[in-house]
Amino acid sequence: MAAAAKPHYGLFRRAIPDLVSPEFATFDAEGRLWVTEAHTGQVRAFDGEGQEVARFVLEVKPNVLREPHGIAIAPNGEVFVADAFEQCVIVLNGEGLRLRTIGKRGAGLGDMREPRGLAIGGGKLYVADSGNHRIDVFALDGKFERALGKRGYGDGELLAPNDVAVDADGRVFVADLGNQRIARFGKDGAFGRAWGGIGPFSGLFHAPTGIAVFDGRVFVADRDNHRVQVFDGEGLPDHEWGVHAVRPREGNGKLHYPNAVAIAPKGDVVAVVEGLEGRVQLFGDEGEDASDPPIVDRSASAHYEGGCDAAADLVAMLEPAGPTVSIFDMGHETPVEITRFGRSGTRAGQFLVPADVEFSVDHRSVWVSDPLVHRISEFSLARDPGAVLRFDPYMARFARALDLAAVPGLPAAPWPPEPTALELGADGTFYVADRANARILAFDARMEFVRAFGEPGTGLGRLLEPTAIALDGSGNVYVADARSRKVESFDAQGKPRGAWPIPNGRNGDGRPRGLAAAEGGGFWVTAEDASILVRADGDGIPVATIGKAWTAGLGRLEFFHPEGIARTPDGGLVVVDAGNHRFQVLDAKGGFRTAWGSRLFLTPTFETK
Amino acid sequence: MNNSPMISLRATTLLLVLAVPLVAALASPRSTSNASPRSTSNAAPRDTALAASRDAGEVRKITSNGGRYVLEVREPEGGFQRGKPLAFDVRVMHAGDPDRALTDVELLVDADMPEHLHGTNRAPRIERAADGSFHVENVYLHMAGWWEVFLDVVEGPWTERAQMRVIIE
């Protein structure tokens, strides 16, 4: 008798909406779906009908939320949750009471940094230790056993692994995010094989962030390709599903940045987590209706994310999905893209995941940070403002790069610097946020290192996740710290001045993402989770809010997960409206000036009066 | 960019060498304002056609895109040609001291086709000679079109690029 055909998934069944930044999910033995919400500190459980049956709020201490990411459930019902706030795994019982903690922040074996996906198999806990570029293996009681992989690009090496899965034979599959591939290790920990590479076609990935295995097949959340790919255990493509949402917020089977995937114990349901859209979609077997996926142009377009900058009549935008940098001429009714540059790779002049962009003082070059390769790179711009306006793909040229891991004189730290935010002062002082070590590095006008300030932790002068830097006219330095939910201020010498929370419109603190000094003092900051833009005065007191909190608006001055912001020379603002695939430009009073990006996301903007 | 006319050098090959204006002389690593974040403004890419044709093996000077280095490139025997492993020699000097080859830098070589968004399909080999110069082999321009040959100078934490435009007909 012939074996029954394996399911061909892709049939939309239902959605679980109204989640806040869902990150990972797993099913328990009874078929309940457990979901982590990174930005609310919550773990939530849903039954097969999508009804919520449990909810735990995880706190380090009262009113200090954990940041739950990966989740796995042991056969005895214990719930393992990766916590990025304390950089550990916490173990809960079925009622949400913490039983024990596994690991701590560090680079040594048994330590972890930025733990992401978890898996349990064969009585072991597997942790995707993103910040240490390896998989940590523990006994379920927390005893460290071994690590798989190390930082690198070759066989058996990993770069920011984001998720892990274990099959019935004990083989370990890793979503090797930074290397855009899947890596497989044997039960004995030996490297087996890897497959993938960056690209839109079957078998290639654009940000493989989630992974699950079931019945000999490997399921991959291919986030920036907006699909789920299914492989056999050797990496041979089986099938895929997912089409980018055509209309904003569209669901019902359309996918938008799926970042994790989980398989029900009977194999009849696949849960696909879409963090940006705040939902989980459940899919089943398409059966006889199964068909080949449509051929879709998956080329990135207007996926503006991360930081941005403005200088003179220019604006620089990052499109990490490219990865590329776009330069716009703003001297017209609408922004006009005049060049775009960048290509994926680890060599000089290429990018892996660019995080911020900064014009030089004379705005004839731009700097780009790329944390996974520890590098900031400068590209010169051969632009003649008097020439005929046109798109010139060759306007930018890679000039030079600074490997921060090799800079002499930096204070010792557990990890090589991972540059994210960049900010250049008028005096030539160049500030660089070091994500890995939660500090700010300052260089003089000759790019000689001069000082570091900030240190890991909570409290005045301490940072957890610096995402943006701004400078005021007095030389004070403001740092957006997303994980600590505050804006920290230092004087020019790095002495702490104050720290201010950002309101999130729900009587809580928002996650600051972008930051810019405000005209006349104070600062503008985006609360990414609440989708609002807040202006604070020089004492950190909020004085204005733009956008409708938590509404995912599409109109003018409405935002969906806004990220970087930059002040224009005339006191206006550029806002990366990342979730809406566009950027908006505001005048000095906070009024709408213009927007640019994906057409479908712009139409409502310009229809709104 | 690309405003200057290109001068045909050979029937099959045309080479443009970047002539980026030099700024202040550089006496030591990061010792001048040329290393500042505002530095490359004076070194904005500007392609300039060669003033004269050349013979095989002729030496050309290239200024790096950041203005820090001058590179002397002795062209391949027979010039840059398609489908043939090419070899050439490179000397690297600080722009402020163009007569003394640097012996404490590394050189990385690659080639790219900006209009096709791909590079070369072979890995160049680079050896350092006793006099500090570099011998580059196995540069392979496998198809016709616009190539950029990248010469990346690595000195301490810095990597700075010089590049040559090569048109293969």
Image: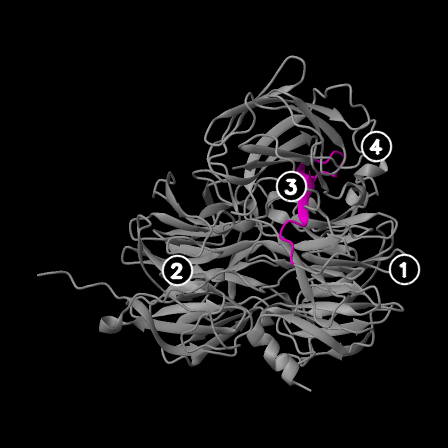
**The disc numbered 2 marks a residue on which chain?**
A
Specify which label sits upstream in the sequence, 3 or 1.
Answer: 3
Q: Residues within 10 Å of mark 4 (few under 14, many from 20)?
A: some
Helix, strand or loop at disc 1?
Answer: loop
Looking at the rendered structure, the kind of residue marked 2 is Ala
Q: Is residue A299 visible?
A: yes
Q: Residues within 10 Å of mark 3 (few under 14, many from 20)?
A: some
The answer to whether marks 3 and 2 sit on the same chain is yes
Give the spatial CA distance, label 4 vs label 2: 59 Å
**The disc numbered 1 marks a residue on which chain?**
A
Q: Is residue A451 visible?
A: no
Q: Which residue is mark 1?
A: A473
The answer to whether marks 4 and 2 sit on the same chain is no
Specify which label sits upstream in the sequence, 3 or 2.
Answer: 2
Q: In front of the other: label 3 or label 1?
A: 1
From this view, report whether residue B53 is shown above or below residue A149. Answer: above
Which quadrant, please, contains the C terminus of chain A? bottom right
Q: Which residue is mark 4?
A: B31
Looking at the rendered structure, the kind of residue marked 4 is Ser
Q: In front of the other: label 3 or label 2?
A: 3
Which residues fall within the magenta stretch?
A: A391-414
Q: Which residue is mark 2?
A: A74
Q: Are marks 4 and 3 in contact (CB under 8 Å)?
A: no
Give the spatial CA distance, label 4 vs label 3: 25 Å
Relative depth, front residue between A313 and A219: A313
Give the spatial CA distance, label 1 vs label 2: 55 Å
> x%, y% of residue A296?
42, 65
**The disc numbered 3 marks a residue on which chain?**
A
Relative depth, front residue between A170 and A306: A306
Q: Which residue is mark 3?
A: A416
The answer to whether marks 3 and 1 sit on the same chain is yes
The answer to whether marks 4 and 3 sit on the same chain is no
